[in-house]
Amino acid sequence: MAEDEIVLNTPWRRDPGDVGPALERWARETIGPDIELFDIRAPGNGYSSETVLFETRDPSGAVDSLVARLAPMPDVFPVFAEYDLTLQRKCMQLVRADTDVPVPDVVHPEQDASWLGTPFIVMRRVDGVAPLDVPPYVFGGWVMDATPEERAHMQHNAISVLVQLHEITPETHDLSWVTPRQGGDSALERLLAHERWYYEWAREGDTYPLIERSLDWLEKHMPRDIPGVFSWGDARIGNMLWRDFEPVAVLDWEMATVGPREVDLAWMIFLHRFFQDMAERFEMPGLPDFMERDTLAATYEGLSGHTVAHLEWYEVFAALRFAIVSVRTTARSVAYGVQEKTADPDDVIMFRNLLEQMMDGSYWT
């Protein structure tokens, strides 16, 4: 499912060899008593949950390739306060039923935590490759090796996914189950209230001045009366599986929500800018002409007929969301002794320079 298997130092994850026997007992109870499991392994990336890849063989010899997504164990410093696998399953079922966006087929949702220690969902595996996060795809690999025309086709297809997802709206579907519970009169007010709530939970009493400054900036400059649509939440090319530069599976729905269209668009723009900035800091060329801001915005407008507005605000919002996630993942690494706590709390934000540029206005010049 990935270009390479990169093994990260993640002591909060279980060994697939420990999960395998319990998963096989579950399969024999749920799928069939003579089911055999083999090739049980875990991909090396991903931070918010555990993923286990495995094959099943029935008595006739038929083989099925599956993937289990496990909710994080409650005692291993989770990234998110809530990890709702039911919500993720409902997102994929909605998208699968009402759009042409490819998503995995959820074949076995399991709420009984007694099997593996947490709930999990089992999906049919999709044959495709994802741009790597570790090391980032801007450092090398199949995206770097592609022709400019192939990358242009890829980014056009990525934006097409967003346009199709955003055709699902509160006017066409009941989206109450994916709407943030935090208060507010508009979709944006609810989203920002959710981020404030998440920050209070994630920081565990520590203060991050740059994040609090960004929250205040977003409150002060918030666009008003912007309608919300169904939002993927973690919209980026690394969360898609690709084949011949066509998306064959859209993954990772734990951040799905209801928000303005630009929330997903700005996240996709910023996450590439984050990787590109990392490449430049290592004096590597990266891909400066790929997933470029104005090109993506123009592509979105051309495919959707929607005029992109207030993009700067949504880019700050994207950076803020990623900064709070960074706070949590860094705190976990410190708790497990993988890294040391920084003297300056804002240094946990890997892209501190970019967020500071946003705050002083120089980011867009």
Image (cartoon, helix red, strand yellow):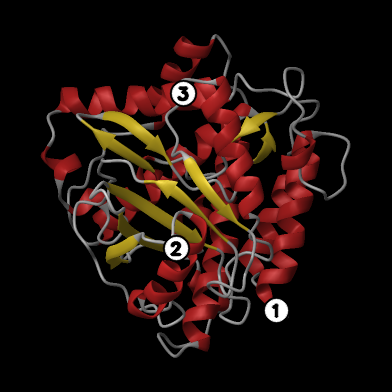
Sequence-wise, the earlier of marks 1 and 2 is: 2
The residue mark sitting in front, 3 or 2, is 2
What x and y, as percent, mark residue 109? 57, 51
- Label 1's element? loop
Amino acid at circle 3: Ala
**What is the CA distance from the residue labelled 3 to the residue labelled 2?**
49 Å
Toward the viewer: 49 or 147?
A: 49
Q: Which residue is mark 3?
A: 297
Alpha-carbon span between mark 3 and mark 1: 37 Å
Q: Is residue 237 left or right of residue 211?
A: left
Q: Position of residue 342 (x, y in %)?
A: 49, 83
Q: Which residue is mark 2?
A: 28
Q: In terms of sequence position, does the residue under pointer 3 or pointer 2 come before the other?
A: 2
Q: Position of residue 70 (x, y in %)?
A: 51, 63
Vertical position of residue 112 compared to residue 124: above or below: below
Quick one: SS at disc 3? helix
Camera-nearest residue between 63 and 313: 63
The label nearer to you, 1 versus 2, is: 2
Q: Which residue is mark 1?
A: 204
